[in-house]
């Protein structure tokens, strides 16, 4: 599993661009920037939608005041689902949504789990991290996907 001090692995995310789905590499997202990255097992799921994402959206200005250049959310959903989620939550334009539909990034970081027993396939564990120029500076991983406490915006803000 990735840990503080490690460089993020190379991966390709799908993002919704002005003319449709586009690719962004780990380097495109994290190089030369201080980024808060939080991961959710699935868009629109109760904990992700009602507890996890809202805290990062509500605290966006506080993160920026602490020198954070961007807030990004990665999920093991396709880019169309994440685009709909960004719009439905009002997070579009404030949070960058990174689709890891094949869970390549989740597996490369060692932060994936098998959600097949619940019909969800390979998913990302719930976590939040501070990444500075591609290097993990803070990492908070939840023990279970049903809670968003260690990986909450408030917990991460207190560590920056």
Image (cartoon, helix red, strand yellow):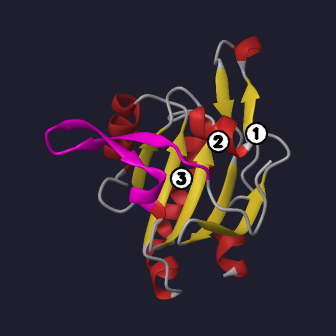
The Cα atoms of the two marked residues, 3 and 2, are separated by 9 Å
In x, y percent, where is residue 57?
A: 46, 62
Q: Quadrant of residue 93?
A: bottom left
Q: Secondary structure at mark 1?
A: loop
- Of labels 1 and 3, earlier in sequence is 3
| Side of 75 where 159 appears, left or right | right
- Of labels 1 and 2, earlier in sequence is 2
Instruction: State the residue lying farthest toward the right.
Output: 143
In x, y percent, where is residue 128?
A: 66, 58
Whether residues under marks 1 and 2 lie with C-beta atoms below 8 angstroms apart, the answer is yes
Task: Give the extent of the magenta segment.
Answer: 9-29
Measuring 63% from the left and 68% from the top, which residue is drawn there?
135
- Name the one closer to the observer, 44 or 119: 119
- Of labels 3 and 2, earlier in sequence is 2
Measuring 43% from the left and 75% from the top, which residue is drawn there?
69
Q: Residues within 10 Å of mark 2 (few under 14, many from 20)?
A: some
Q: Quadrant of residue 156?
A: bottom right
* Label at residue 146: 1
Q: Residues within 10 Å of mark 3 (few under 14, many from 20)?
A: many
Measuring 34% from the left and 30% from the top, which residue is drawn there?
80
| Side of 73 where 138 appears, left or right | right
In x, y percent, where is residue 28?
A: 39, 58
Residue that badge 2 annotates? 47
Q: Is residue 81 above or below residue 83?
A: above
Residue that badge 3 annotates? 53
Q: Secondary structure at mark 3?
A: helix
* Label at residue 118: none
The Cα atoms of the two marked residues, 1 and 2, are separated by 6 Å
Whether residues under marks 1 and 3 lie with C-beta atoms below 8 angstroms apart, the answer is no
């Amino acid at each position: 599993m990735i840990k503080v001090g490690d460089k993020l692995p190379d991966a390709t995310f799908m993002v919704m661009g002005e003319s449709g789905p586009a690719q962004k590499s780990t380097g495109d997202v994290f190089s030369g920037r201080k980024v808060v990255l939080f991961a959710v097992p699935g868009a629109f799921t109760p904990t992700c939608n009602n507890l996890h994402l809202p805290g990062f959206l509500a605290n966006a200005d506080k993160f920026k005041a602490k020198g954070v250049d961007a807030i990004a959310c990665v999920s093991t959903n396709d880019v169309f689902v994440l685009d709909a989620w960004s719009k439905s939550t009002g997070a579009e334009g404030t949070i960058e949504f990174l689709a890891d539909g094949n869970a390549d990034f989740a597996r490369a970081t060692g932060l994936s789990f098998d959600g097949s027993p619940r019909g969800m396939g390979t998913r990302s564990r719930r976590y939040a991290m501070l990444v500075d120029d591609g290097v993990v500076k803070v990492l908070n991983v939840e023990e279970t996907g049903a809670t968003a406490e260690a990986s909450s915006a408030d917990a991460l803000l207190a560590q920056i």
